[in-house]
Amino acid sequence: MPTAAKERKLEALAKKQEALAKKEAREAKKQERLAKRAEKEKEKAAKGPAKGPTAKASIVKKKPLPVEASVEVSLAVENLEDLKLSEENLSQNDDTDTTTTTTNNNNNNNNNNNNNMKLLSLPADTLVHMLKYLNARSLGASLISSRYIATVIFPHLIYKHLNSRLNSLNTQRTFRTNDSPVERSKEIYSRAMNSGNLIGSSSFSKLQKKLEKTLNAQGLSPSTRPPLTYSSIIYPTYSRFLEESCNHLSHLSLGPLSSPPLPKILNGRFISCSPEHTVIRCSGGNRRGGGSGVACWGVGKRGQLGTGKRDDSAFPNVIPRGVGFNVRVVQVSAGGGLVRVAHTLLLTDTGRVLSFGCAQYGQLGHGFSAGKQLPDETRPRYIEYLNGQRIICVSAGELHSSCVNNDGDLYTWGEGFCGQLGHGDKRPQLTPKKVGGDLEFECVESVGCGSRQTVCVTEEGEVFSCGLGWFGVLGRPFTPYEFGANDSRMGLDEVIEEDDVVVDEVVVGEGEDEAGLAAAQPAANVNAPPPPPPQPNIDGLSDQQQSDLELLSKLTLDDNSDQCVPKKIEALDGIVIQGISVGHRHVLALDIDGVVYSWGSGGGGALGHGDIVQRNIPERVDELVHIKKKVTQITAGVDISMVVVDDGGVFAWGRTKNGRNGLGMQEGSVTIPRQVQLGDHTGLAVDVEAAYVHSLIVLCTGETLICGGVGVDDSVDGAGKDDDGLPRLIREGDINCWQRGKEVVEVKKVEKYKKYGKYETKGRTAMLAERDKWGV
């Protein structure tokens, strides 16, 4: 055997052995996680119920799966073969008048002709009750495979199925207290179908022809297959949106055998915003519909809008290309700070990640270019270093990014000067790198990035944090940095506005006793002589300059501070956290009972405890407990906090300047949760996102409300002079989170003529191509 071939064979064998070793290590890690989880459960059972971080904290216990999950499992897509009817049954079913007689005749025919039709042998009311728990995919497959379900059962099923989708995980949402659930579902369905621009008749006919072609290829003749009506095609799409928004059920599309679920509490499921721009999942509109299914607007100086340009946009613009054919985006994340460093992350249903925007600090994860540069990306680009990983969660911070794969591993990249990457140092990472340390044997479920912090939640409901610990954002004690402690905090105080005064880390708002606080500080002696100037040393440098030189000589990116590695927040022991939201300098956490905890800076009253004092450990937001509101979604911005409760309402607190949180106030701050007045949209909220000068609310009809506004093209932030500070409906571009629209095609302008001096000519190639036409 030639030497080269032998080397290739040995190299292939070595790679195979290495892959096998990695697989064994992964399995060992999984077994160790399971053993560790079993030990923790035994310890908890031995100790009994644990207490929360405060005396008033509620005891949280894990709850069993809802009934809907077991029904959906039992009515999976593999049973669709039992739903197909023969031509004899179809003809007999078409002759019936009422649902009851149809079901009785169908039962008799099934018993005589087809004993395998299990579901269709049930009474109509029982069948409707079972089918209303089907997920959107199974319901759509049933409608195109069973004529009986599509024509007879579906008219009685649609509103009951919609009502089951409108239920949250534990409590039923209320739209109007005077209406019955069916009447409420009918009104929501009507609003959803009439909002924005639905798919037009021409587009619907094209979609219908595509489905007919697919059914013909599968051998279903027009006489046996069900009719493809407008509602049977459109409703499953809306049902999928309700599953993701109301029930928090969404999966990756990795094939029939592997479809890992996304975290239930996930920021950016439909919408995400930074202080400069907004990203939303959408499919609505005629001219702007379809395409990537993602629309962006706001400041676009660093390409964070993904349109290929660096122009600002005051209206939503759908990204025309860059994602791929038949690829669906399942999560969006907008990152950035108070300076022009914004970037965007997209997660597809195949578990891949795209990034675009500012790459100055390596936060896009693409590494150096061919010229050893970090150029901005104005179009979505896949992160090649994550190929082979199946990502289930992404998060974009101010200068760094992170993601979690389906094995529970956390990856971070970008600027790491504050230890926010969790790698035990302050070095930047231009490409994704796996986080070890205390997370090595933990299974991470979701992650959130702030300005200089990273906080993640494990499957057991434990919370780990790393990064800059100022303002108590880490929620735990920490050791100081060895070098650069003051520089790490640079830029975090820029958010303090004119209504606050900062005195030794204590934020004093309007109307508080500033004199009493100042009295606690040592008084200055005005009669004391001025201090002597620093004496130069033998080298001609002052003592300060000499100390700076010594510090520079010892400066290193290695740091032993525990701010540079993920550490568990011990104050949350005994509380099962299901989701977190990391703001600029404060954090919100949500447990499985719908209770909210907050910690970090209290600037503007962002923590919701009735004051503006910072909390170094998590503390429960008691106001939401006292008014008996169960929270389903949370978001933390720049000194803003907002939540969605189980009845579809929205509560907000924090800074209110220019109506940024929808409380109808142009100045001042709110230190306890207050309900946002939604007007005609009361009880319809399913998602919320807050940033710096604006926030957004997603409704169960697919519409979006905006509070405040980002100034584009050097204009002033805010909605305008006539704004009342209340949420208003976004109508520009007819953005809707669920409606199917026309595919976006980017048209390039082609010049017919080129100018050469003062003459216009087609060019030599075009002229020679036309010479045969003129007989030359």
Image: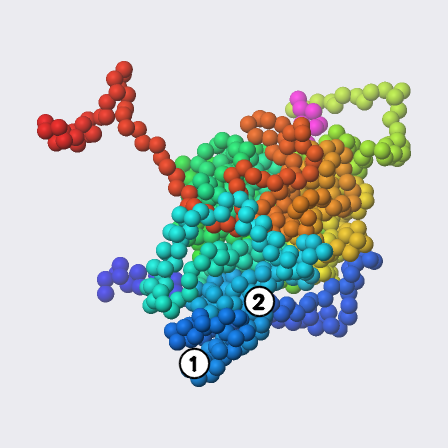
Image point (44%, 40%), residue name: 287
Identify which amino acid the numbered label 2 is placed on: Tyr
Marks 1 and 2, the one that precedes in the sequence: 1
Residue 466, given in percent of the width and then of the height, sits at: 65, 49
Query: Label 1 belongs to which residue?
Result: 114
Identify which amino acid the numbered label 1 is placed on: Asn
Q: Main secondary structure of the magenta part?
A: helix
Q: Residue furthest top?
A: 758
Circle 2: is it few (<14), some (14-19), or many (20+) Cα within 10 Å? many
Image point (80%, 35%), residue name: 509
Q: Is residue 518 above or below residue 110?
A: above
Q: Is residue 569 above or below residue 70?
A: above
Q: Residue furthest bottom?
A: 112
Q: Is residue 455 visible?
A: no
Circle 1: is it few (<14), some (14-19), or many (20+) Cα within 10 Å? some
Q: Does the magenta segment cover residue 32?
A: no
Of 764 and 563, which appears nearest the observer?
A: 764
Residue 124, given in percent of the width and then of the height, sits at: 55, 73
Secondary structure of residue under mark 2: loop
Q: Quadrant of the N terminus?
A: bottom left
Range covered by the magenta-colored residues: 540-548
* Disc sitting over residue 372 in the figure: none
Image point (46%, 56%), residue name: 230
Q: Does the magenta segment cover residue 547?
A: yes
Q: Nearer the viewer, mark 1 or mark 2?
A: 1
Q: Is residue 604 visible?
A: yes
Of 173 and 431, which appears nearest the observer?
A: 173
